[in-house]
């Protein structure tokens, strides 16, 4: 099918098996880029055309959170989806393990960059969403953690313009983004410890969250792990010691 990107017509062969698919639409790989084409009923999921949010995200200079770099339109110029850079890593969520095997310094560096990306988004009034293992990629070769699929990210300025002043709105976004990132990291630690055996895991996962939350107090995750991992060669050795808290 033909689409329009940056005023140019481009053909996407939707007869081919998609690179990936989810509840919002299907993704196709072309020229080392990912083209996300939405199901028609997902375009107005939040009561307004997602085109507004996705256009806003273009150009925000995150490092390890992959955002749209162009919008995709149907030939009648109705919104169809967005294009983004490809992320390398395991696609099967049950195999997304191993990031905790990174050397401690590399693990902490990844957390610092992701926390910085989250603050940058918050300072641009972006509320992240869908931060979960299915939207996380770990490039084992380069040792880089990346987050994908900003399709449900919302722009706080559009939603809460009359409810908060500028600084308060940024703080609301920052609190949500920070909490979602910490939940993801804890989920990934848990998956590495148990080798992804999700049966009866919710209660144990919550125990791990509670332990880290209480132990770190007011520290960020990167600050907490930088302090905690001081005497460990890699993060995994420490995480295995946490197993006793989730029995």
Image: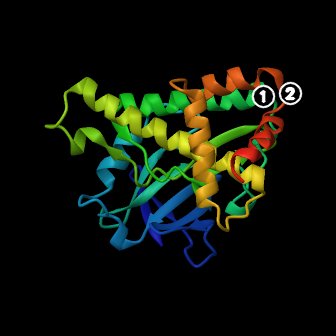
Q: Residue 204: percent from the left, percent from the top?
A: 64, 55
Residue at screen point 35% across, 72% down: 40
Q: Quadrant of residue 15?
A: bottom right
Q: Residue 177: percent from the left, percent from the top?
A: 44, 38
Q: Residue 93: percent from the left, percent from the top?
A: 67, 61
Image quadrant in which the C terminus is located: bottom right
- Tell me if 237 is positioned left or right of 173 in this view: right
Q: Residue 94: percent from the left, percent from the top?
A: 71, 63
Residue linked to disc 2:
233
Of residues 247 and 240, the one drawn nearer to the viewer in this rendering? 247
Crowd rating for badge 1 (residues with CA inside 10 Å; few <14, some 14–19, many 20+)? many
Q: Quadrant of residue 92?
A: bottom right
Residue linked to disc 1:
104
- Tell me if 200 is positioned left or right of 24 in this view: right
User: Residue 87: in sight, yes or no?
Assistant: no
Residue at screen point 76% across, 55% down: 194
Residue at screen point 75% across, 50% down: 192
């Amino acid at each position: 099918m033909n689409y329009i990107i940056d005023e140019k017509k481009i053909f996407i062969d939707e007869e081919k098996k998609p690179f990936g698919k989810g509840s919002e639409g299907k993704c196709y790989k072309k020229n080392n880029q990912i083209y996300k084409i939405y199901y028609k009923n997902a375009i107005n999921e939040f009561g307004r055309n997602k085109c507004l949010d996705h256009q806003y995200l273009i150009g925000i200079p995150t490092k390890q959170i992959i955002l749209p770099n162009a919008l995709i339109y149907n030939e009648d110029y109705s919104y169809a989806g967005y294009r983004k850079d490809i992320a390398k890593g395991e696609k099967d969520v049950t195999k997304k393990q191993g990031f905790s095997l990174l050397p401690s310094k590399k693990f902490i560096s990844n957390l610092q960059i992701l926390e910085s990306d989250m603050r940058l988004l918050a300072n641009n009034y972006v509320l992240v969403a869908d931060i979960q293992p299915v939207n996380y990629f770990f490039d084992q070769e380069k040792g880089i953690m990346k987050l994908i699929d900003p399709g449900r990210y919302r722009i706080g300025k559009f939603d809460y313009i009359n409810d908060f002043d500028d600084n308060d709105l940024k703080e609301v976004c920052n609190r949500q983004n920070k909490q979602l990132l910490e939940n993801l990291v804890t989920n990934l630690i848990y998956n590495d410890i148990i080798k992804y055996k999700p049966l009866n895991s919710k209660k144990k996962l919550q125990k791990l969250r509670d332990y880290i939350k209480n132990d770190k107090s007011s520290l960020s995750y990167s600050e907490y792990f930088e302090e905690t991992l001081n005497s460990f060669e890699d993060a995994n050795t420490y995480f295995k010691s946490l197993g006793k808290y989730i029995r």
